[in-house]
């Protein structure tokens, strides 16, 4: 018996030794630039693999033995390396760009494999490369990230003149827009015609429509995570782009001398400027005093301290200028900076710590004689984010971290100009601390079932120095049901809070879950649930963020918004990855969303709580997408069927009404055709049913003026929207470096209505006559827009 026990014990110990596990880890880089690659797919066996993180790092735990490790990423040559694992191994790898695949669509959920959308646990997530964005037809000659994501299901545009976007029924302020982890509060140039993202400076982006990991927080509807290029660590180079509306330049290169042919670090510096203002005098005398321009600067640099530690510094600065003669002028822009340290603590622990600054400010100049004044406003925040990733084994990855943000809201200051009679005035600043702790786990339960789940505990502390008004009945507004109006209550006192003193504390518990069930290698089902809290409010009566909108923190009279979203999807890949298809349906409940009351004055009002009301909302829909990934012709077809509604006491007879961004149907067809090595062609067709609008239901005369009477909020619809854009790219000959991009936006000159307004007919046959009649007028921003851009690499 004793012999049998010893034999069994010996065999058990031998088995344990034979099955001893080791860790394979390292970084994956671009062979030509040395830039570390995000989301590289690393396969070590059937249903066994991992992907690189944002910094190109990977870690996987394996049993002792020989493995053929495969590295693949869309747009790069798939490469394999055979390696014997009998101890922990550090393996860095370089991938070469695959020129033959540059015509293929590079849209994927989380990895380079074309079946990644099927096998990934992530749901409602889209990764889009800058290479794909640059192939799409452009408006005004400038490739644009925000207009590109509007071609995807569940993402709708605001109008022709805006790069703003809405995701699954959310308003523009419910999108968290990050540039190297720094929050961008207004992502538009030229009132929305361009976005602030220079595609030459962008590496890639990820859009979360749902299934948002617990590492993100602070917004209800989506996260747009944009990463800037790190710069070429092997050689100096750059690009120069000359367009009709704007031009741009980028330089990059190595810093110091590191291993092999790489520098110790690298840098990237990019700049862009429009020059519409230079052509304004050509429009006649009425444009002599008109200024309309923007510029922006992108910077990123990194330095390798040693094999395990690296520093990054990135920044963005952008400005817009608009001045209309002696009437009005405004300047607005974003500034951000991120200092990040990454440390490979060991082959399983990866730490990143970021210190972030972000500022959005604007000023509005009233230049009318005698009343000249400047209105200044801004929001700035300081943010610290430590995050630890633990690669427990090849079936379990854990991320945990903290998030601390300090806010300073400066809602407005009136500064007299040119000795005008206007009195100076400064609205009270507001301060807040937002913090969060989170844990996020990716877990493979079996070959069929995988999960990503987590929990985020958020806190928002409104603090002084501040003065909080006391209103009669305890609220700033009282709803009068008999007259169906809000009445402002009298101020009966005030409470003063010293600097740092807590005014009001809010907490949010935010569970997150995504699950994937793999039917087979080409078919899967997915489910996700998100709860999200948002403690900031964009007070606006427009469909998109404008330079003059007011951001307000939650507090005694503004409760935080929160939402619950459920989504279910089916994903399929077929024809050996040549095509993939997905369909998702979602339902979202929104609580304590903010809307302006009838007759609200939002711009020059200090006590903004007297102009808004809070209520509930709901959004639900169906999204379809088919991608063609291979061949000379690639592209996708997407369709969205959706409804978005709000219900706020005192608005629309206390019944649900369409939200400003409600759109029942939206169809996008995108085609990219590679004729040969010299010519690439692109086209996209967009169709959308009409957005909601509030038309007057009657009119009355008051003090000699004809005044429109409005009843149901968003009770009517604009006409359907549709547009066709085309482009052609002439690539350089072998040995040459210049390329030409030609495009025509709105090819068949569709006059899409951005809005319809009503005005009194006061002139008949060139004679001023008060007719008492009104006329509907359609506002369209542009017809056919041709453009040409020359791009040169050096």
Image: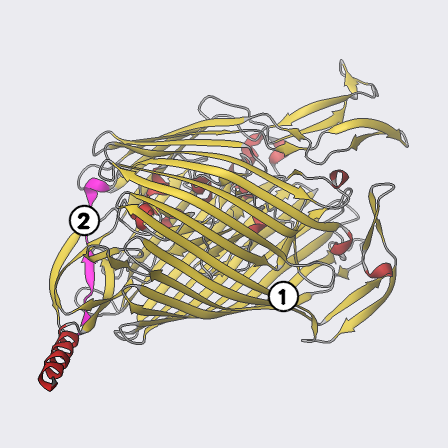
Residue at position x 56%, y 38% in the image: 158
In this figure, which colouring scheme has been used for the structure? Answer: secondary structure
**Count of numbered marks:** 2
Left or right position of 578 against 716 = left
- Residue 301 or residue 388, whichever sits in front: 388
Q: Is residue 618 above or below residue 214?
A: above
Mark 2 neighbour density, 10 Å: few (under 14) some (14–19) many (20 or more): some
Q: Is residue 542 visible?
A: no
**Which segment did they paint magenta?**
87-101
Q: Secondary structure at mark 1?
A: strand
Q: 765 or 646: which is nearer to us?
A: 646
Quadrant (top left, top right, bottom left, bottom right) of the N terminus: bottom left
Q: Is residue 386 magenta?
A: no
- In the picture of the structure, the residue carrying the numbered disc 2 is 77
Find residue 356 and report its horizontal and vertical position in percent: 49, 66
Q: Which mark sits nearer the N-terminus, 1 or 2?
A: 2
The residue most toward the front is: 1
The residue indicated by pointer 1 is 408
Rendering quarter of residue 265 = bottom left
Query: Which type of secondary structure does the marked residue at label 2 adopt?
Result: loop
Q: Position of residue 463 (x, y in %)?
A: 68, 71
Residue 374 shows up from this direction: yes
Q: CA distance from mark 1 to mark 2?
A: 48 Å
Q: Is residue 612 above or below residue 342?
A: above
Numbered badge on residue 109? none
Dots 1, 2 in contact, CB < 8 A: no
């Amino acid at each position: 018996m004793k012999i049998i026990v010893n034999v069994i014990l010996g065999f058990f110990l031998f088995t344990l030794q034979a099955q001893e596990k080791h860790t394979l880890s390292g970084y994956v880089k671009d062979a030509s630039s040395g830039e570390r690659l995000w989301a590289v797919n690393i396969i070590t066996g059937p249903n066994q693999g991992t992907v690189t993180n944002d910094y190109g790092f990977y870690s996987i735990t394996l049993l002792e033995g020989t493995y053929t490790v495969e590295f693949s990423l869309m747009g790069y040559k798939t490469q394999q390396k055979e390696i014997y694992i009998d101890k922990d191994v550090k393996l860095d790898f370089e991938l070469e760009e695959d020129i033959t695949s540059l015509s293929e669509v590079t849209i994927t959920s989380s990895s380079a494999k074309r079946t990644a959308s099927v096998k990934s646990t992530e749901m409602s997530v889209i990764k889009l490369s800058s290479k794909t964005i640059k192939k799409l037809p452009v408006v005004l000659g400038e490739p644009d990230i925000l207009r590109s994501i509007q071609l995807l299901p569940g993402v709708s545009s605001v109008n022709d003149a805006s790069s703003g976007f809405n995701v699954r029924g959310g308003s523009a302020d419910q999108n968290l827009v990050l540039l190297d982890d720094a929050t961008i509060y207004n992502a538009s140039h030229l009132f929305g015609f361009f976005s602030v993202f220079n595609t030459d400076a962008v590496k890639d982006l990820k859009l979360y429509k749902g299934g948002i990991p617990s590492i993100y927080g602070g917004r209800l509807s989506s996260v747009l995570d944009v990463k800037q290029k790190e710069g070429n660590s092997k050689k100096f180079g750059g690009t120069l782009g000359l367009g009709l509306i704007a031009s741009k330049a980028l330089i990059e290169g190595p810093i110091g001398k590191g291993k092999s042919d790489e520098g110790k670090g690298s840098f990237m510096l990019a700049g862009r400027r429009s020059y519409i203002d230079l052509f304004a005098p050509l429009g006649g005398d009425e444009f002599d005093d008109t200024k309309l321009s923007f510029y922006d600067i992108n910077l990123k640099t990194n330095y390798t301290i040693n094999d395990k530690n690296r520093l990054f510094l990135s920044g963005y600065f952008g400005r817009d200028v608009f001045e209309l003669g002696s009437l009005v002028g405004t300047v607005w822009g974003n500034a951000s900076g991120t200092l990040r340290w990454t440390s490979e603590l060991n082959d399983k622990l990866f730490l990143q710590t970021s210190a972030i600054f972000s500022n959005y400010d604007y000023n509005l100049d009233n230049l009318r004689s005698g009343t000249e004044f400047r209105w200044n406003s801004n929001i700035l925040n300081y943010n610290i984010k430590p995050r630890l990733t633990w690669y427990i084994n090849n079936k379990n990855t854990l991320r945990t971290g903290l998030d601390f943000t300090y806010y300073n809201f400066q809602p407005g200051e009136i500064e007299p100009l040119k000795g005008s009679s206007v009195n100076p005035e400064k609205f009270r600043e507001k301060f807040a601390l937002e913090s969060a702790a989170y844990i996020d786990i990716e877990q493979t339960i079996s070959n069929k079932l995988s999960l990503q789940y987590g929990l985020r505990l958020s806190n928002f502390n409104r603090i002084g120095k501040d003065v909080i008004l006391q209103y009669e009945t305890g609220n700033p507004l009282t709803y009068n049901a008999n007259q169906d109006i809000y009445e402002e209550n009298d101020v009966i006192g005030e409470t003063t809070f010293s600097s740092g003193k807590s005014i009001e504390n809010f907490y949010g518990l935010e569970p997150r879950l995504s699950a994937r069930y793999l039917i087979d290698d080409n078919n899967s089902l997915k489910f996700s649930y998100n709860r999200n809290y948002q403690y900031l409010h964009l007070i606006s009566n427009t469909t998109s963020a404008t330079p003059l909108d007011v951001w307000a923190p939650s507090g005694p009279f503004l409760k935080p918004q929160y939402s619950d979203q459920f989504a279910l999807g089916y994903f399929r890949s077929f024809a050996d990855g040549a095509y993939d298809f997905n369909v998702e349906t979602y339902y979202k409940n929104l609580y304590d969303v903010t809307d302006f009351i009838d007759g609200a004055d939002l711009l020059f009002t200090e006590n903004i709580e007297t102009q808004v009301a809070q209520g509930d909302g709901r959004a639900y829909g169906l999204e379809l997408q088919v991608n063609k990934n291979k061949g000379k012709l690639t592209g996708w077809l997407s369709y969205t069927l959706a409804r978005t509604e709000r219900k706020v006491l005192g608005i629309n007879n206390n019944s649900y009404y369409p939200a400003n961004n409600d759109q029942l149907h939206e169809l996008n067809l995108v085609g990219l055709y590679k004729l040969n090595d010299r010519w690439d062609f692109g086209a996209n067709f967009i169709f959308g049913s009409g957005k909601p609008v509030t038309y007057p239901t009657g009119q009355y005369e008051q003090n000699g003026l004809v005044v429109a009477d409005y009843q149901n909020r968003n009770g009517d619809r604009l006409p359907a929207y549709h547009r066709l854009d085309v482009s052609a790219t002439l690539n350089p000959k072998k040995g040459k470096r210049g390329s030409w991009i030609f495009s025509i936006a709105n090819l068949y000159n569709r006059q899409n209505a951005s809005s319809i307004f009503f005005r009194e007919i006061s002139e008949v046959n060139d004679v001023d006559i008060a007719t008492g009649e009104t006329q509907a007028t359609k506002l369209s921003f542009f017809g056919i827009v041709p453009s040409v851009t020359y791009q040169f690499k050096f």
